[in-house]
Amino acid sequence: MSEPTQAWPATEALIEQGNSLMWSPGMVPLNTIANIVVAIAFLLIPLLLMRIARRRRDFRAGPMLTGFSIVSISCGVISLLEVGSLLHPSPSLAWLTIAFKLVGALTLLIAAGLLWRALPGILTMPSDRQLRETNDSLARATRELEAFTASVSHDLRSPLTTIAGQAGLLELSMGEQASDDQRRRLSRIQNSVKQMSELIDALLVLSRISRHTLHREIVDVSGIAEAVIAELRQNDPLRVVQVKIQPGMSVHGDRRLISDLVTNLLANSWKFTSKTAQPSIEMDASTNGYMATLHVRDNGAGFDMAYVQKLFKPFQRLHGPAEFTGSGIGLATVARIVERHGGRIWAEAKPLQGATFHFTLPSMPITDEFLVGARSAS
């Protein structure tokens, strides 16, 4: 039992020797520099964690990152307090150091628990190899979709061309001897062929939007809208429609797709106000930060909000073909374009009281990471 009692003095001597070495005049500057470097490193870590949280909003680990940030800040402050203790030793600094150590230890336990809870989700995150395989698979699917689209377009147009040609020859062969019933049946065939051709064109446009490479630039929406209205007036000169376009509207996006979007919405309003006594169409915008909210209003046929979920889906028509013509693809195309630009679209309407379409688009150059974060937040 005498050996342990003999070991304690030796241990105390080693500790005393270490303390005297640390507090020696030659070692104080080195310890000060080391603690300052450690403090800077610890205080930089929360900035990096904050950047990760902002760039990857889909990775919902805010409380855990906050906990580790507090731990890192506590360690940085402790290092600075040790610098103060080296230069000016005092009991208050010692107690303050202990307090920060307790806060850091408690926060570290909480952050470790949050990390344990988040561990299954972290382990299921895809690796670089899995992402490459997914991208390769997506590229193959895109190529197959392009080949399928081209095949469908060709294979469907060929019999339609034959039907249209034969219907035309049949009309010529019947001449003036055709009865009203025969002419009516022939007209239905020709109209069906035309409608099918328009559906094929609309489907091709819809499929190309997803594959179209965006060329972002500042786009003059007001100028596009004025040109669309001028073309609509030229194609339908007998109609008198009151149109109000807000000047100076602009967004940041692909000029071609934005033009298709505005054309579809204004043509939609033009069509659905055709049975209104005093038709009017308005388009204006407001800007909030990086995003602009645009509005297209009309006082046309409107629709029942009970069916609004069908509005932006392909082939989902809220009005029968006998009321208003159309392919049922236009609003689906509009929604796809808005989504490609990182925005969202919604509508408000009442039957026979018109409709208003609201949609958001970037108003200035922003990064793809910002758009991903905006989608995740919404």
Image: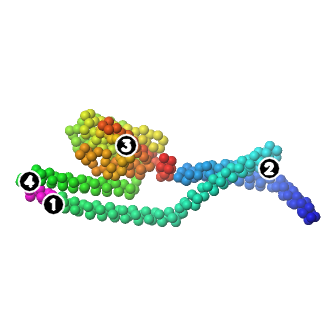
Horizontal arrangement in the rendering, residue 309 relative to residue 325 (left or right): right
First reached walking from the N terminus: tag 2 or tag 4: 2
Residue 86's tag is: 2
Residue at the location (36% across, 54% down)? 209
Report helix, strand or loop for mark 3: helix
**Residue type of the residue flagged with mark 1:** Gln
Q: Mark 3 against mark 1, which lies toward the viewer?
A: 3
Q: CA distance from mark 4 to mark 1?
A: 16 Å
Residue 166's tag is: 1
Residue at the location (93% across, 64% down)? 2
Q: In the displayed image of the protein, which residue is found farthest to the right?
A: 2
Q: CA distance from mark 3 to mark 2?
A: 73 Å
Q: CA distance from mark 2 to mark 4?
A: 110 Å
- The secondary structure that dominates the magenta segment is helix
**Residue type of the residue flagged with mark 4:** Ala
Q: Which residue is mark 3?
A: 306
In the rendered image, residue 171 lying in the magenta stretch gets the answer yes
**Residue type of the residue flagged with mark 2:** Leu
- The foreground one among 352 and 170 is 352
Q: Which residue is mark 4?
A: 178
The x and y percentages for residue 293 are 42, 41
